[in-house]
């Protein structure tokens, strides 16, 4: 008569309804239906913990839209300060997720141009360094190579002819 059952009564039914709705949408193993129906609120709670709780992480994408827009704005201002290929690539990926395809294409084009320019500049620097730095023998070019001693000469020669 003075029990606390009236506090828990509607919540058990709501748990069962929630578990049944999830069961119908996801269609897990059939034995879960029996656990929900026969087990009452305890069975529904077990189902929700085992089957529905792992699905809750899938809802994370619903709330990321707001963060994505602010991230795009931050990257756009970063690009004004530092127009690097990495920033363009990151903002292009975010544009794709927002389905802003024209802006994504432009940002990807700028990122590719930035990577190509950096790669070409790096190759130019490598060639320049190779031309101006001394080689393994301490000389700058093959024309300045030292005379090779008798043991490096062809058989029958005493010294290498320059």
Image (cartoon, rainbow, N blue to C red):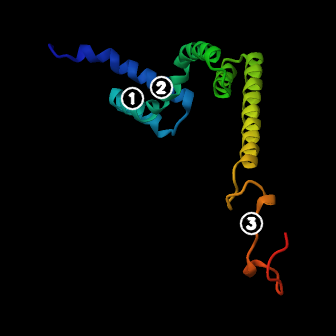
Quick check: 22 above or below 4? below
Q: Position of residue 17 (x, y in %)?
A: 44, 21
Left or right: 154, with 62 as reference point: right
Residue mark closest to the camera, 2 vs 3: 3
* Residue occupying image coordinates x 64% and y 17%: 79
The answer to whether 142 is drawn above or below residue 2 in the figure is: below
Residue that appears at 41% across and 33% down:
47
Q: On screen, 4 above or below 47? A: above
Asked which secondary structure carries label 3, the reply is loop
Is 89 positioned to the left or the right of 11 in the image?
A: right
Residue where numbered disc 1 is placed: 44
- Horizontal and vertical percent position of residue 105: 77, 22
**Residue at 57% of width from left, 14% of height from top?**
74
Q: Which of the 4 quarters of the picture holds residue 72?
A: top right
Task: Answer left or right for 107 relative to 59.
Answer: right
Which-is-in-front pick, marks 1 and 3?
3
Q: Earlier in the sequence, mark 1 or mark 3?
A: 1
* Residue 4 x, y percent position in the rendering: 19, 16
Q: Give the secondary structure at mark 1.
A: helix
Indicate left or right for 7 with 67 as reference: left
Query: CB of mark 1 within 8 Å of CB of mark 2?
Result: yes
33 or 78, which lies in front?
Answer: 78
In which quadrant of the rendered view does residue 161 lie? Answer: bottom right
Please rate how many residues cluster around mark 3, counting C-alpha atoms within 10 Å: few if below 14, some from 14 to 19, many from 20. few
Can you identify the residue that label 3 sits on?
A: 146
Residue plotted at (23% across, 17% down): 5
Q: CA distance from mark 1 to mark 3?
A: 88 Å
Judging depth in this view, the residue of 51 and 110 nearest the camera is 110
Residue 158 or residue 101, whichever sits in front: 158
Q: Residues within 10 Å of mark 1 (few under 14, many from 20)?
A: many
Split into 4 quadrants, where in the image is the C terminus? Answer: bottom right
């Amino acid at each position: 008569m003075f029990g606390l059952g009236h506090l828990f009564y509607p919540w058990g039914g709501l748990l069962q309804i929630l578990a049944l709705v999830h069961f119908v949408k996801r269609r897990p193993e059939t034995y879960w239906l029996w656990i929900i129906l026969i087990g009452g609120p305890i069975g529904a709670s077990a189902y929700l913990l085992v089957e529905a709780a792992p699905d809750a992480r899938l809802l994370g994408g619903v709330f990321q839209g707001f963060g994505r827009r602010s991230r795009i704005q931050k990257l756009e201002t970063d690009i004004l300060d530092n127009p690097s290929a990495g920033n363009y690539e990151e903002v292009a990926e975010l544009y794709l997720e927002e389905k802003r395809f024209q802006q994504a294409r432009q940002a990807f084009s700028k990122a590719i141009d930035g990577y190509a320019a950096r790669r070409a500049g790096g190759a130019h620097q490598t060639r320049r360094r190779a031309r101006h730095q001394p080689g393994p023998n301490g000389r700058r070019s093959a024309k300045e190579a030292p005379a090779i001693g008798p043991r490096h000469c062809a058989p029958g020669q005493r010294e290498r002819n320059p």
